[in-house]
Image: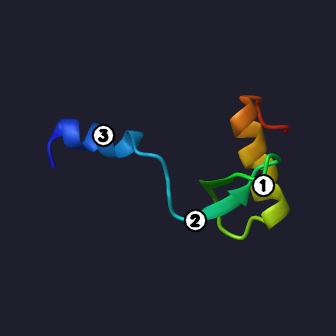
Amino acid sequence: MSDHEQEQEQKRPELLGTEMREATLPDGSQAVIVVRAGTPQTEVDEKAARMRRGTPEAK
């Protein structure tokens, strides 16, 4: 593997332990987002709503 390929590999986000989930937004529309595996559906929906509004996640 070249240096460039190794650098790109290190920049790639970690996807193990994540899953794509369908979320229902407050207006009733649907979205698909990537969340940590096992995230409760209410949190998935809340995260999708925050992403739609463009507000940062609560910590």
Horizontal placement of 28 versus 20: left or right?
right
Which quarter of the rendering shows the C terminus? top right
Disc 2 residue crowd, few under 14, some 14–19, many 20+, Cα 10 Å:
some
Q: Nearer the viewer, residue 48 or 9?
A: 48
Q: Nearer the viewer, residue 46 or 1?
A: 46
Residue 27's tag is: none
Q: Residue at label 1?
A: 45
Residue farthest to the front?
28
The image quarter in which residue 51 lies: top right
What secondary structure is found at the residue carrying circle 2?
strand
Circle 3: element type? helix
Q: Secondary structure at mark 1?
A: helix
Residue at 40 percent of width and 45 percent of height? 12
Q: Residue at x 78, y 37 (%)?
A: 57
Instruction: Identify the amino acid type marked 2.
Output: Glu
> Residue 56: horizontal and vertical position, in percent?
76, 31
Q: In which image quadrant can residue 24 be found?
A: bottom right
Q: Which residue is mark 3?
A: 8
- Mark in front: 3 vs 2: 2
Depicted 42 relative to depicted 46: above or below: below
| N-term mark: 1 or 2 | 2
- Please tell me whether mark 3 or mark 1 is closer to you in this view: 1
Mark 3–mark 1 distance (CA, rounded to whole Å): 32 Å
Please state the horizontal and vertical placement of residue 14, each as a whole percent of the image.
Answer: 49, 53
In the image, residue 13 sits, relative to residue 24, either above or below, namely above
Residue 19, label in figure: 2
Q: Is residue 4 left or right of residue 27?
A: left
Structural distance between the alpha carbons of marks 1 and 2: 14 Å
Task: Please identify the quarter of the rendering in which residue 54 is found.
Answer: top right
| First in sequence: mark 3 vs mark 2 | 3
